[in-house]
Amino acid sequence: MSTTVAIIYHSGYGHTARVAEAVARGVRSTANTQSLLIRVEDIDQHWQTLEQVDAIVFGSPTYMGSVSAQFKAFMDATSHQVFAKGGLWANKVAAGFTNAASRSGDKLATLQQLSIFAAQHAMHWINLGLPPGHNSSTTTEDVMNRDSYFLGVGAQSNFDEGPELAPKHPDIMTAEHLGARVALVTHELAEGRRNLSLRRVA
Amino acid sequence: MSTTVAIIYHSGYGHTARVAEAVARGVRSTANTQSLLIRVEDIDQHWQTLEQVDAIVFGSPTYMGSVSAQFKAFMDATSHQVFAKGGLWANKVAAGFTNAASRSGDKLATLQQLSIFAAQHAMHWINLGLPPGHNSSTTTEDVMNRDSYFLGVGAQSNFDEGPELAPKHPDIMTAEHLGARVALVTHELAEGRRNLSLRRVA
Amino acid sequence: MSTTVAIIYHSGYGHTARVAEAVARGVRSTANTQSLLIRVEDIDQHWQTLEQVDAIVFGSPTYMGSVSAQFKAFMDATSHQVFAKGGLWANKVAAGFTNAASRSGDKLATLQQLSIFAAQHAMHWINLGLPPGHNSSTTTEDVMNRDSYFLGVGAQSNFDEGPELAPKHPDIMTAEHLGARVALVTHELAEGRRNLSLRRVA
Amino acid sequence: MSTTVAIIYHSGYGHTARVAEAVARGVRSTANTQSLLIRVEDIDQHWQTLEQVDAIVFGSPTYMGSVSAQFKAFMDATSHQVFAKGGLWANKVAAGFTNAASRSGDKLATLQQLSIFAAQHAMHWINLGLPPGHNSSTTTEDVMNRDSYFLGVGAQSNFDEGPELAPKHPDIMTAEHLGARVALVTHELAEGRRNLSLRRVA
């Protein structure tokens, strides 16, 4: 059976878009999985499609300690488009990523914000699933999950580098990992649901 | 196939224990599901068993804005018992509940703390999955999820009432709901995983 | 000496505006203190004035677990207008309030978001300073801080009541309390700074 | 006039103790200010003294995404020792620091936990007050606030280095900065309060 993972994101200068694209590649690396990349600017064309997808990954830069206003406008719009219509996203899979110039930069607060948002929609939150990265005298920044996030991806892009240079490769690989992980869990859930419902019917 | 949901909890005065028991009842209301109630005081007898369970629900009173020291001692012990042994709880299902005398009382911070803890263990966080409760002129406190939590259960027990009186019935029903929901998702995942792995083998 | 406390807020339907006005009344109840109510829609007329104020109280409804997109647009604008100009708000006093239809409704997450925002601006965060409210069998909702918030004001307005009815009087009194408290601490700090600098000059 | 800043901390292996000592040095670098270093293991000798201090800085390692159980035991004890006795710490100054092996490692969650704890005690939270650190292609880890925290100090110690090596000098300087900053604000508040009360008496 086939599943679809949507990635809804905002990117101010192109860095977060690169993370979003990496998540999508990770999704597509899983057999029988489609990815659907949606910029928040285009969200109004996609509300109906989103009712059908199996998973949604949310991504935003961290501005002043939380998601961008542009991304928040999308979040607020779900109040009418999704929540008030009876919880259209309930039981879908959710995950999140963010990007900022700083290693911490309060990016954890953004991931918390996204996970609470998913909770309000009764979605299942899939965490990053990687061990800590650069945390000893023998490691470098050239490892996955270098800054050691767990709720999702916390990418880092130097503020004086464009999206052709930042975020660096380890962050891109971390995002690909999240995409593949989300796709796998989405498959497991979809298979299990079909099986349980087939058995009930039989 | 059969699955097991463990509930690990601390209760200072018996109120949180009642919530834990309600979660366990909800778990058992689902076909083919075992519940395993574990007090944090007894955790050392259960580390090996926990490697085998499919889901773990975490519960603690909220003291001064976060889980009790007793529950935190359990959380800290997982660093050596679970995390350092290679992430023994990775990909298990997780969920959480808390109880305090106040409606808010910063209980959300406890649920956030539990969800971050689950993220460090690479578990899948299952949210409460209920709409807001008492939020209009026509509702009362006698509804499920009366104070409108989403990450998990936020029960409320008057500080001058013993566990035979508090938390009140709507909170108990909310906890039962969480248990049943966790059991269902745990089944879906277990079924899906078995199926996918059978197909790979065939 | 005279001090000024600004209140910057967004209100979708008028309820949060009533909380903002109550904060302003609390501020003015303190001798030698001016209040300055600013709607986020009007923020562009006030950037220069805000450089001169002694304290800023931030207020937003909680939508989907965090501040509204309109309020976030103001927060994001401070990145260029305040932060990048050298931290123009550093060492000012800050505080926060929010409003939603639910008792919890993840309003704590909004207060955390506001306090992290204030931290990025190096402001001093003044908490609510009230004991828990309605938390026993002998209390009712007719007490200040009824839902027991601590980082700031968490007001509650039934979704089927207009701003002429909601939030109810106890929440309004709670907001007045916050305003008066912020004004007092602002005075203490301003007095202390003047004194210490006079002594250095002398 | 003289003020006292207490630093209450737990340290599992000595790293957080070095941060605590740096905060104390920063405090003492301010004229007319005493520092009082208290290990949580010794807290029972200090409850009465703490009623008299002007500020308390809280510090704990981050274990599994929040303060250590040992530090939480102290936090929980304040419920009876401080909160229930009428809010003995109300209007004191508060601040916080933490340490872990990871750059993020969910240390922000620990700082949030400490700030909510301070809020429950009606204390005034003083943020770090430093700009972001290492966030461009031209910076290195050898700068203050290298990982860019704002609510407090987020120090980093490689897990394979003892406290004689970690955390590194920039983190120590960051902690000294916090101590000096807390001492300054504490002075400003103490001066202002004395002045306002003298004027009322006169």
Image (cartoon, coloured by chain):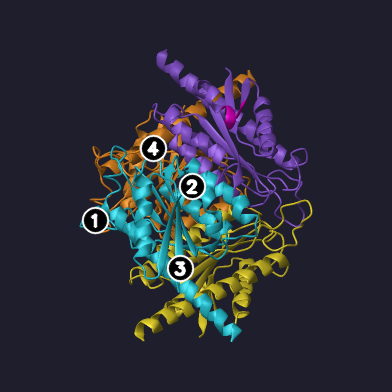
Chain colours: A cyan, B yellow, C purple, D orange
**CA distance for labels 3 and 1:** 46 Å
- Considering the numbered disc 3 on the image, is that residue within a helix, a strand or a loop? strand
The residue carrying mark 4 is D179
Q: Chain of mark 2?
A: A
**Residue located 35% across and 62% down the image:** A26
- The residue identified by callout 2 is A42
* Chain for disc number 1: D
Is residue B74 visible in the rendered image? The answer is no
Image depth: mark 3 or mark 1 in front: 3
Residue type highlighted by circle 2:
Asp
Q: Is residue C40 magenta?
A: yes
Which one is in front in this view, the residue at disc 1 or the one at disc 2?
Answer: 2
The image shows residue C152, relative to residue C41, as above or below, that is below
Q: Quadrant of the C terminus of chain D?
A: top right
Indicate which disc, 1 or 4, sits on the residue closer to the N terminus.
1
Magenta span: C37-42
Three-letter code, disc 3 = Thr
> Mark 1 to mark 2: distance in Å?
49 Å
Whether tag 1 and tag 2 are in contact, CB under 8 A, the answer is no
| Whole-number angstrom distance, CA of label 1 to CA of label 4 | 25 Å
